[in-house]
Every structure is written in C-alpha cells, then in structure tokens.
Amino acid sequence: MNKILTPWSAACCFYILLGCNGSQQTNLDQKSSDTMNTSTNRGITLTQQTFGKYDQQDVTSYVLMNEKGMEVRIMNYGGTITNIFTKDSSGKTGDVVLGFDTFDGYLNKDNPYFGCLVGRYANRIAKGQFSLDGKTYKLAKNNNGNSLHGGLKGFDKVLWSATAVGDTSLQLKYTSKDEEEGYPGNLQVEILYTLTPNNELRIDYKATTDKATPVNLTNHAYFNLSAGADSTILGHQLLLDADRYTEVDKNLIPTGQLPAVKGTSMDFNSPRAIGMDIMKVAGGYDHNWVLNKKGLELKLAATLYHPGTGRYMEAYTTTPGIQFYSGNFLNGNLTGKGGQKYVQHAGMCLETQHFPDSPNQPSFPNTILKPGETYTQTTVYKFSTK
Ligand code: GAL
C-alpha cells in the first residue's frame, strides 16, 4: 500500500489553486433545515437541504454547482451521489445518474447500490473469508456465500459526517470499527468530493487503520448519459484502456487468470457500442478490467459517449482496475426518478477499484493496509459534449 499521500496532497494543492482556504472548515452537519450556507468560490457554490431521516438523524443533501451549470448532489447517507446534472450538446440539462427522487427510495432493500460509496472492500471476497498474518477472518456473507461490497451493512448504509472544505468540496468521514462486518482494525475513512470549474467531479479517498486490513473503496454511480431519453445504455460507446481483464467463475469470483481482450467481446480499446456484443457475454458485462498503467498514477481509464445527446464522460483514476457493470441485475422492478422503470441495462457503473478478491489472490496487487500506512485513491469523472 502506498505510504505517500500523493493524490490527497494533490487535491489540497488543487484547492489552493482554486483559492480555497482549507483551514476554514465548516461543519455542515451542525446546521439544519433547508437551503442555507450558500457561498461561492471561483463560481462553485455549495448549499445543503434536508433530504430525510435515518436512525433519528437528519440526512442532508449537499449541492455543488459550477458556473457552467453542472450540479452534483451528494447525501451523507452512504456518501451517495444522488444526481449529476450536465448539459447535452444543445445546452439542455439532464440528470445522468440513476437514483430516486426521495430518500426512502434509497432504503429499499433492492436498492442496487445506486451512487453510493462502497467499502470496506468493494466487489467480492470469495467465501467471505481471507487469512492475514496466520489468522483467518470471517466476513458477513451477502452474495451466494461470498462477501460483496463490504457485507450486510457496508459503507453505503451508514451516515457519514460531512464538512465543507472551501466551497468546492464536501468532505465525508466515517470510522469503521474493529470487527465491523468481520474486518480487522478501526479504519478511519475520509472522502473528498470536489466539483471543478471544468465540469469534473473529483473523488479523493483516504484511509488509515490500527490493524492490518484489506481496503478497496469506490463509488457505485450508475450512469446513463442520455438522461432518461434512452431506457438503456446499450447505445453508449465505451472505451476502456485495458488489454486484460480478471476472468471470473459463475459466481463472479476471479479465477486468477487475466485473459487478453484483443479481438473478443471484452475488447473496448477503441470506442464500441456496449450493445454490440453484450449478448455474447454470459449475464452481460460485470468484470474488472486490468488498466494499462505503470503504477498508481492518475490516468485516463475509460470514456463513455452517448451519440444521441453528444454527452461525453472521461474517467481518470489511480486504481489498477475498473469494474464495468452493465446493470445486468436491474429488472424493471425499481421505479426511480420521475417514475422511470429501471429495466435491465438502464444504467452502467464504472467502478474504479483494486481487483476483486485480492486478499485471496496473491498474484493481484496488494490491498492490505497496515498501521502507519495511508490508503489513497483518486478518481475524476469529467463531463463534456462532442
Ligand atoms: C456491482 C457488481 C455486480 C452487482 C452490483 C450490485 O458492483 O459487480 O455483480 O453485485 O454491483 O447489484
């Protein structure tokens, strides 16, 4: 695990460049009720509204807006991105992520991780167990005998404490206690969501621990760049800068093999319509691609284009992998924003991450965080049109 705080430090420099004063932190949780604390910084504003109640506490929606009209809403329950409004090539604004109009929707037991933060370990850990320093740890199992996305109550189902950093960023903190969902160590997690004047949503993740533990954090936004115009993402064109992927078994557990994508249905090295070959992939796309990169540098990993609206998104990340999930388990049972029925492939995730089941796969990049080290991850989703 890298000990250098590179992405986090870079984020801090970034705020300084934007003219933010990191020492002027405001605890937004101490304020209550509707739309208040409006302030501006280089054209970015951060406001807040009450969104619901969870565990007798207020759930707050934080709204970041820039001068170009991009708007991102994040709530402190699950650190969930509930909305991303961007313009299409004709200047019309639309919401490009799936979700619900009201907070209650997010509590639905079938909510498939819409927009949330995922941890302590994103993706699957086989048989819900791993061994570390001679001890076997048993995790909460919630997916065919495996542990998925942190277990029964992962980071997506907790209230995070929120603080404004300048006016461009929202910092979320959560302490995951020793033995929570079976994981060792008290893990201090900090997430920084930043909106930039260039239509970038930047997510900086940071974690420290007091016992060695696996850590793999990501965000689970479901994108549909048509903003409701197309019921599925099958017409979107995707590029993934990856020559290999982690092969999985029928329960989506890695086999340890990293097959080459060249010339197969998994080859997205040039932009290609997602629907073109999806029928050839059993169950649809739900795989981790091994990104072409040298180390943990922030690098373009994926691009996504919706020809009908001209919306274009680039995903940059420091992580070694990206899970492209084509919304295969959506089945029309969920009614989301504006009464939309979320049918199969209604949205897709680009989850920047370490490889699934790394704690049980010695050949995969290390995911064990030790005391004294700092886990970092940075991902940037940049929106434009073409
Ligand atoms: C994805 C995962 C899928 C599915 C989904 C939630 O991250 O790859 O297999 O579990 O989350 O429905």
Image (tube, grey):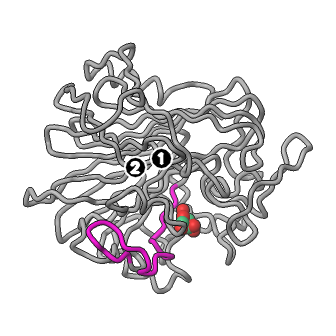
Relative to residue 348, is residue 62 depicted above or below? above
Query: Is residue 48 rendered to the left or right of residue 131?
Result: left
In magenta, the rendered stretch is 322-342
Q: Is residue 251 among the parts visible in the rendering?
A: yes
Dots 2 and 1: beta carbons under 8 Å? yes
**What residue do we see at 7% from left, 60% from top?**
90
Residue 380 lies in the magenta stretch: no
Near mark 1 (Cα within 10 A), the count class, few <14, some 14-19 or many ≥20, is many
Q: Nearer the viewer, residue 74 or 219?
A: 74
Place of residue 86 in the rendered image (x, y in percent of width and height, measured from the top left): 21, 53
Task: Please state the horizontal and vertical placement of residue 67, each as a whole percent of the image.
Answer: 14, 38
Residue at the farthest front position: 56
- In the picture of the structure, the residue carrying the numbered disc 1 is 77
In the picture, measured across the screen, residue 374 lies left or right of residue 220, that is: right
> Which residue is situated farthest in the right direction here?
134
Give the residue type at disc 2. Answer: Gly
Instruction: Point out the quarter of the image occupied by ligand 1.
Output: bottom right
Give the vertical position of 155 relative to 248 (above or below): above
> Is the magenta region chiefly helix, strand or loop?
loop
Residue 225 is labelled as: none
Q: Residue furthest top?
A: 23
Nearer the observer, 168 or 379? 168
Mark 1: which secondary structure?
loop
